[in-house]
Image (spheres, rainbow, N blue to C red):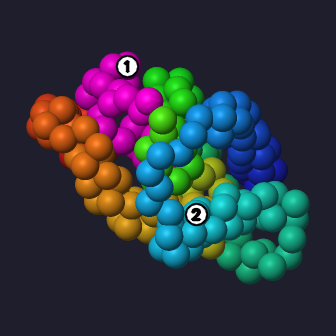
Amino acid sequence: MSPWFGKAIILASSIVMVIIRAPHGQRSRRVKVVRSGWGALETVLLALAWLAFFVPLVWVAGAPVFAFADYLLRPVPLSAGVVCLAVGLWLFARSHADLGTNWSISLEVREKHQLVTQGIYRSLRHPMYSALLLYSLGQALVVPNWIVGPSYGVAMVLLFAFRIGPEERMMVEEFGEDYEAYRGRTKRLVPGVW
């Protein structure tokens, strides 16, 4: 199967991700930040995430730097990858919509910040991270390259590993018992499991 199927799907998925996020980023930037968790680690994690987002686009463009790691694209992984990408993008859009102006790209509390417990947040505390993990899995299945395929997943696992703890501590500090109660009735990333 031609790798161009994977290239077209990844290019389209990347464009959809930007289309989903862009208006939310513009809207949230208009709301004043009252508390920020920005630091050196956050800068490194976000730079790594952006780099990992662009690696597949370099592969799509046909740069020979990754050609040595290409392998044959198969229909079953491609199909499973498309499903993961689609569900991941849906969850990504739903998470942004439910958060509204409470969302930001970094660890921040904004003016009039609210604890969102409705919509997709009713059962998951971090559905956007779940969405990015699903998207990462989809990319790994759709991109027939041993380096490019898993690149976003590696970056996202590092981001989650170093960010979920501080994010939850920030929410406890901001919302206290309300967040503790919310944490007690929800799962972090997978409904009913974890």
- Residue at numbered disc 1: 119
Badge 2 vs badge 1, beta-carbon distance below 8 Å: no
* Residue type, label 2: Leu
145 vs 138, left or right, is right
Residue at position x 36%, y 42% in the image:
126
Helix, strand or loop for disc 2: helix
Q: Position of residue 180 (x, y in %)?
A: 15, 40
Q: Which mark is residue 58?
A: none
Which of the pair 72/96 is nearer the observer?
Answer: 96
Q: Which residues are magenta?
A: 112-134
Residue at position x 33%, y 20% in the image:
118
Residue count near mark 1 (Cα–Cα under 10 Å), binned few <14, some 14–19, many ≥20: few
Verify whether residue 163 appears in magenta. no
Residue count near mark 2 (Cα–Cα under 10 Å), binned few <14, some 14–19, many ≥20: some
Q: Which mark is residue 46?
A: 2
Residue at position x 18%, y 32% in the image:
178
* Residue type, label 1: Gly
140 vs 15, left or right, is left
Which of the pair 134/71 is nearer the observer?
Answer: 134
